[in-house]
């Protein structure tokens, strides 16, 4: 399978008026330029070969934009895996040993009962003491 790329517009590197006039000079519709400025970051083009994506990105950079080229799978999904990130409120610190950990009934390091965690994940854990 041939690799495909997308060009991501991240914002402006300089003056907005200069960028606007240069992009219009390159043939971009004024509405599209307005959308690029107001909604960045956004995908400008996708499904491009590396050569064409480099040419496209260079033209936008020369006009005063900041761009990034990303590889993606043909069905449109980005390369890599989605990850889930726990919120800060899902963590607590053991008052006994200082271990920062996900909220549980008892500390996984020292077995000390953690305050404010009468139920929830880890409440089934019983210390070996």
Image (cartoon, rainbow, N blue to C red):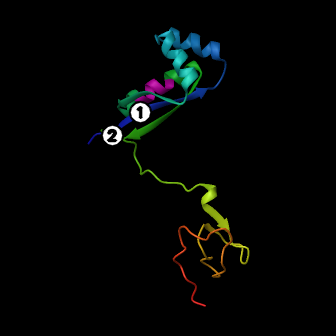
Question: For residue 99: magenta?
Answer: no
Pick the quarter of the image with the C terminus.
Answer: bottom right
Q: Which residue is mark 1?
A: 6
User: Which of the 4 image quarters holds residue 62?
Assistant: top right
Residue in the picture at 41% in, 33% down: 6
Provide the major secondary structure of the magenta segment: helix
Rendered position, 80 above or below 28: below
Residue interval drawn in magenta? 53-58
User: Left or right: 120 with respect to 116?
Assistant: left
Closer mark to the observer between disc 2 and disc 1: 1
Residue 9 in the image, given as x and y percentages of width and height: 52, 28
The front one of 128 and 42 is: 128
- Neighbourhood count class around disc 1 (C-alpha, 10 Å): few under 14, some 14–19, many 20 upward: many
- Neighbourhood count class around disc 2 (C-alpha, 10 Å): few under 14, some 14–19, many 20 upward: few
Tag 2's secondary structure?
Answer: loop
Residue in the picture at 53% in, 21% down: 36
Q: Looking at this view, name the residue that lies furthest to the front.
A: 118
The front one of 96 and 77 is: 96
As drawn, the label of residue 3 is 2
Rendered position, 39 above or below 18: below
Tag 1's secondary structure?
Answer: strand
User: Which of the 4 image quarters holds residue 15?
Assistant: top right
Residue 46 in the image, given as x and y percentages of width and height: 38, 30
The front one of 31 and 68 is: 31
């Amino acid at each position: 399978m041939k690799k495909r790329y997308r060009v991501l517009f991240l914002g402006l590197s300089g003056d907005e008026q200069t960028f606007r006039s240069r992009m219009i000079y390159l043939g971009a519709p004024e509405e599209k330029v307005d959308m690029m400025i107001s909604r960045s970051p956004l995908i400008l083009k996708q499904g491009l070969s590396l050569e064409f994506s480099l040419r496209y990105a260079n033209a936008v950079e020369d006009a005063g934009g900041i761009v990034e080229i990303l590889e993606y799978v043909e069905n449109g999904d980005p390369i890599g895996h989605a990850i889930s990130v726990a919120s800060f409120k899902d963590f607590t610190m053991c008052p006994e040993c200082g271990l920062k950990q996900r909220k549980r009934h008892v500390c996984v390091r020292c077995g000390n009962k953690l305050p404010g965690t009468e139920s929830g994940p880890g409440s089934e854990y019983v210390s070996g003491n």
